[in-house]
Image (cartoon, helix red, strand yellow):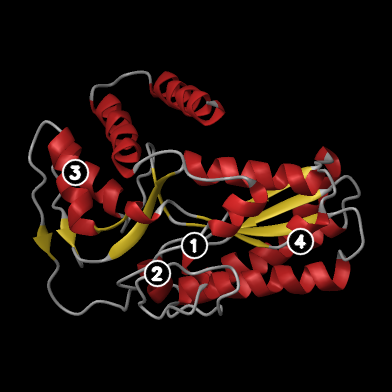
Amino acid sequence: MLNHSLRSFQPEIIFHLAAQSLVRRSYREPIDTYTTNVIGTINVLEAARQTDSVRSVVVITTDKVYENEERDFGYSETDRLGGFDPYSNSKACAEMAVSAYRNSFFRGGKTLIATARAGNVIGGGDWSEDRLLPDVFRSLIFGDDLVIRNPNSVRPWQHTLEPLSGYMLLAKKLFEGQDEFAAAWNFGPDEEASKPVEVILREIEKNWDGRVEWKIANGDHPHETNILKLDSSRARAELGWSSILTLPESLMMTIEWYRAFRDKQDLLRVTRDQIGEYEKKRCL
């Protein structure tokens, strides 16, 4: 099916973002997680290998592919891969599958492949389970209980438009045949955007018309990383990419989208307006 679709459409650039992307679900459904994230990636690579039109492939993994040492400085692309939980580990496996395919089947050819690792992306339209901001806005809009597992967990928060701009820049370099970019890349926020969960909750409360009320989850929970930061200096130096939004700006854009949802505004217009404003800011 995938091979047929690619041959029919004849794409020149492929972005592979499909995944089982939830850590806690990966503990409940490890086989499905590995099947989706590893075999699914291999299926995309195989289909690209058999489609003559493809020149550029960007495979999106995660900032959690690294062997986490709970350290207080960012992981760079040369750090060891690993992943404690099935989700993180499956994404590390996907990274190694891409590397193997690049070396075995795409070396010296016209198709170039890279992987991209982003931080904890936020933004309007996300209603996934077990994610902080969707949980917060379900609580604020629908009255759901907001249960927090670890308010001290530190993550590299960034608006989804930030890494997307990096993915497109990377895809362009590959499309142009610049094979030095066929590698792994971090697209994370600046150091000051890596903040604990509780800071995010308080920032949302400050800009929403109502209190953010939450409670700590009871009982034992599957292991999750406490501290995670990315080093994106390579993307800045070699790709010319960097994040342009501050953490308060990223949170405000997210808050505005969910407020528009609550107020039954035209969400397509709101989303397009946010993209337009972001593009203007990036072009300055």
Q: Quadrant of residue 197?
A: bottom left
Closer to the camera in the image, 84 or 128? 84
Closer to the observer: label 3 or label 2?
Answer: 2
Q: Residue at x 34, y 60 (%)?
A: 155
Marks 4/2 in contact by CB < 8 Å: the verdict is no
Marks 4/3 in contact by CB < 8 Å: the verdict is no
The answer to whether 234 is drawn above or below residue 92 in the figure is: above
**Residue ID for mark 2:** 73
**Residue ID for mark 3:** 203
Marks 3/2 in contact by CB < 8 Å: the verdict is no
Closer to the observer: label 4 or label 1?
Answer: 1
Q: State which tag comes first along the sequence, 3 or 1.
A: 3
Closer to the observer: label 3 or label 1?
Answer: 1
Marks 4/1 in contact by CB < 8 Å: the verdict is no
As measured in the structure, the alpha-carbon distance from the residue carrying label 3 to the one carrying label 2 is 23 Å
Closer to the observer: label 4 or label 2?
Answer: 2
> Counting other residues with Cα less than 10 Å from the Cα at mark 2, is it few (<14), some (14-19), or many (20 or more)?
few
**In the drawing, does residue 14 fall left or right of residue 17?**
right
Closer to the observer: label 4 or label 3?
Answer: 3
Q: Is residue 5 visible?
A: no
Q: Secondary structure at mark 3?
A: helix
Marks 1/2 in contact by CB < 8 Å: the verdict is yes
**Residue ID for mark 1:** 231
Q: Of the residues shown, which amino acid type is indicated by label 1?
A: Asp
